[in-house]
Amino acid sequence: MADILQLQDIPDDFSASYLVYLPTLRQKQRATAFVKDSYVKSVSIFRAGNERIAIKSNVYRSQRKSENPHTINLDVNETTRKLEDAHCSCKAGISGKCAHVLTVVMMIEQWKILGYKAVPSQPSSTSLPQQWDKPRGPKIKAEPVSQMIISRPMNLTRKRKPVIATFIDNRNIEVCDEDIIHLKQLKLSPISYLVEELGSSTTLDTPVGPQLLGSPLSYHGLFEMLPRERRLPEEELKEAEKLVSLQVNNKLMRDHLQDKTGKKVILKDISNIISKVNASKKSDNIESLVSKLKKTEDSLGQSEVAAICLLNSEEKPVLQHLIKCFQKHNPDSSGIKVIMADKDIVERDVFKEEFPDASLLICKFHVLRTFNREITTEKMGISSAQRYVALELIQKLVHSSSEEDYNANLKLIETTCPRQIFNYIDTNWHNIYAMNGF
């Protein structure tokens, strides 16, 4: 059983310099906040060897104490003054490089500076800074006008209503000719110059009524010409597609849609709808698709005829029926030696059962693309440098020329790459390495 140690048994210079990596600014900020708000639940210190001290700690995930805290394990070497090993139960802590590990180090460093001989007990809620009035919800912040989105609301009955600008028409009194004559007689008033040319000026229809061309309110008419304002609703768009299939005149269709929706519709919009309908008709022509694909070219540049089968699912009975039909119409199919398939388990099993003498291979290009998609810094909790080295070694593994070469490359990955990468290869790919083709 390991000996239990006290805080005074840890070296006095214990700090973040014991880490084998340089923490990022984000990790330092989070760790400082965790220490300040007392996220550290407990710290236990044990003797793990002659020169090694083991530290086990629990750090809360958030201020909600009902959640299970993260578990952190540290191994301190008293001779080298370094952390030989660090691990956290969080996703980023698999590699030992997370804010929770730095939190435990900073917490112990603070206790050493304060002169504590033993780990202090967890402070009570009354000893901590109050937390209950800190706003944690979404905040309303000011935004630049250039980044604001102004559009016509489509659904005003939703739970969270948008900010809507309402217009109240207070023009209850109709302006008569006598009123215009009276305003023109006010020679000393600036308004007399405006009404002088009122009769001969050009007006523009806007949502707030006819306005003089060039006035600020006249630009409301240009707002209707914006593409997002001319966008048709879903029902009217389907109706327009039906009218296109009936070959209705473009101008008549435009006038009909304008009267029904009240939106500004131009001939360019009608042309876009016609192009969309024509494109959908071309994509639905399965016969033309097959006619384009059933002639292929081999590695010698010679044309070869290939068969194509379109399936609605990849279930085992469907694949078995496909192979039975293929064998029925191709009596020489028993001489097939090589089958190229993907990693799908159902597909591999069916081909093995129906073609027991054929070698089942996997495309190396798709294998490497799968590794590149699955081995990422977020999914594996590794650094960019570790990911780059791992992908280079995996490429050598995929292109192994013999079984001995494969085993040597796999051993190199096991000793060089993080453990989670080797476990992924061993679980998902090692049992089908014979399909690599060597």
Image (tube, helix red, strand yellow):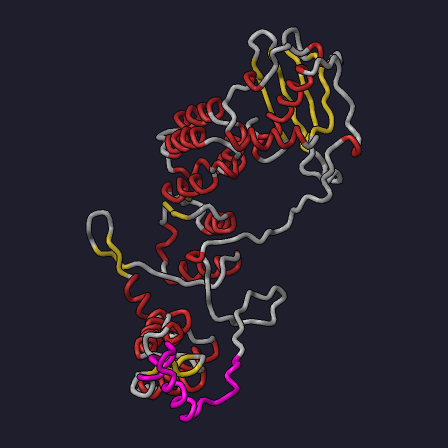
**Residue under the point 43% across and 76% down:** 232
Which residue lies most toward the front here? 188
Rendered location of residue 245, percent (x, y): 36, 83
Q: Residue at x 44, y 32 (%)?
A: 384
Residue 186 falls in image quadrant: bottom left
Outermost residue toward the left? Answer: 301
| Residue 278 shows up from this direction | no
Q: Is residue 75 something that shows in the picture?
A: yes
In the image, 21 versus 151, the foreground residue is: 151
Please determine whether, in this image, residue 335 is positioned above or below residue 69: below
Q: Is residue 395 magenta?
A: no
Residue 203, image quadrant: bottom left
For the magenta stretch, what is the residue range? 169-197
Residue 255 location (% of width, % of height)? 36, 86
- Judge from the rendering whether residue 191 lies leftward or rightward of residue 113; answer left or right: left
- Location of the C terminus by quadrant is top left
Left or right of residue 77, residue 213 in this image: left
Total labels drawn: 0
Q: Position of residue 370 (x, y in %)?
A: 44, 43
Q: In this view, does 239 lie above or below 337?
A: below
Using the image, determine if residue 206 lies above or below residue 375: below
Quadrant containing the N terminus in the rendered view:
top right
Q: Is residue 302 left or right of residue 375?
A: left
The quarter holding residue 164 reads bottom right
x 40%, y 85%: residue: 183
Determine the residue positioned at 63% across, 7% down: 51
The spot of residue 214 in percent (x, y) is 32, 74
Is residue 176 rendered magenta in the image? Answer: yes
- Observer-nearest residue: 89 or 328? 89
